[in-house]
Amino acid sequence: MEPSTSWIFSLRDLVLSSLKDRGLPIPVDREICSRWQQGLPSGPKETVLYTSCMYQMTPMIQKAVENLEKFGATRGGAASRVAAVAARYFGGLVLRPDKEHLERAYSILRSIYNMLRKSNVEVGLLPDEPYSGALLYELGFVEDFASYAAEVYKYFEERGVRRVITVDPHTQYVLERIYPQYVPGFDLDVRSYLEYIDVSRVKVKISGFAIHDSCLYARFLGKYDLVRRILAGGNPVEDPYVTGRETSGCCGGPAESINPQLATKIALGRAKKLAGLSRTVVSACPICLANLSRTGIVEVRDLAEVVEL
């Protein structure tokens, strides 16, 4: 079924409203973003570890879409208008953080933080870091994105941040490749935490897994080989088509907000192909992690969960 225009604009209204009220694209408790920092020093501010709250809230984005889909959000007409009302007034009640999920997200972020420290990279933490705005851009609301991105850049400028280390491909891509196109004078140094891992010291805790590459990391940000160098000690199972740089499939995540049914079909197809290599899959993207996990076909681990220094 083709997504309705009214549904897409209802989604835009939800995202913009939530960004204005809570600084996040979905109506959830903003404190979920920074709880993983408890007990850690705030550190220097020139170089910061920036989560954009992606690991913390990604499954809740999916839950939001699933709930609104139940209202008939993508069907157009009256059903879509009901979904828009639900999004506006009840979204905060629907999107309850799941404790188990949050604890896993916090564990992943602490693992990334510890790997950076053990690689002699000192990073600062920002308890009130803003969301990057990636979802606005990925949904095609470019003017809204440009306006929001300028605010995010101002936030970093005012705090003296010069280098941002990201933890996921969507934030890395939007900051590295898109912000410079829409934010005048943007000059932050944007790096992925993957670049800082001391590969010579990596220990991989599992073996015989398949790698699911983020499309952004593999084909747009040049991280395909780096991910393999980091995971080489686990002897990942490769296939020239299923895990190839140019031929590996998408998890379906980018279509999730626009057409959840299509996203599910893509995820199922991708999970089945990966399962042909191994029932254990390693990814380095919170959206891939959530989307493939819900298929129930493969066990998906995050890269930060399976490596240590």
Image (tube, helix red, strand yellow):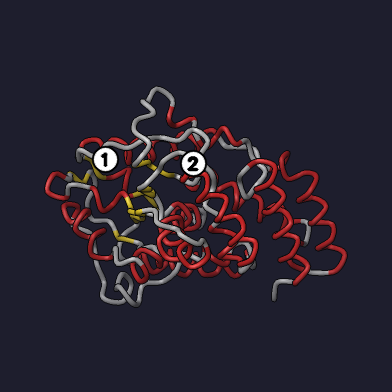
Residue at 84% across, 61% down: 81
| 138 on left or right of 95 | left
Which residue was labeled with disc 2? 158
Residue 109, placed above or below residue 192: above
**Tag 1: Cα neighbours inside 10 Å, few (<14), some, or many (≥20)?**
many
Residue at 36% across, 54% down: 190
Query: Where does residue 186 sit, x and y in percent of width and height?
Result: 45, 58
Which residue occupies the foreground of this view, 189 or 111? 189
Residue at 34% across, 42% down: 47
Q: Could you say whether the residue bearing mark 1 is in a helix, strand or loop?
A: helix
Which residue was labeled with disc 1? 116
Which quarter shows the N terminus? bottom right
Query: Where does residue 188 sit, x and y in percent of width and height?
Result: 39, 53
Q: CA distance from mark 2 to mark 1?
A: 25 Å
Q: Which mark is residue 63?
A: none
Residue 26, placed above or below residue 6: above
Amino acid type at mark 2: Glu
Whether residue 280 is visible here, answered yes or no, is: no
Query: Where does residue 263 sit, x and y in percent of width and height?
Result: 56, 66
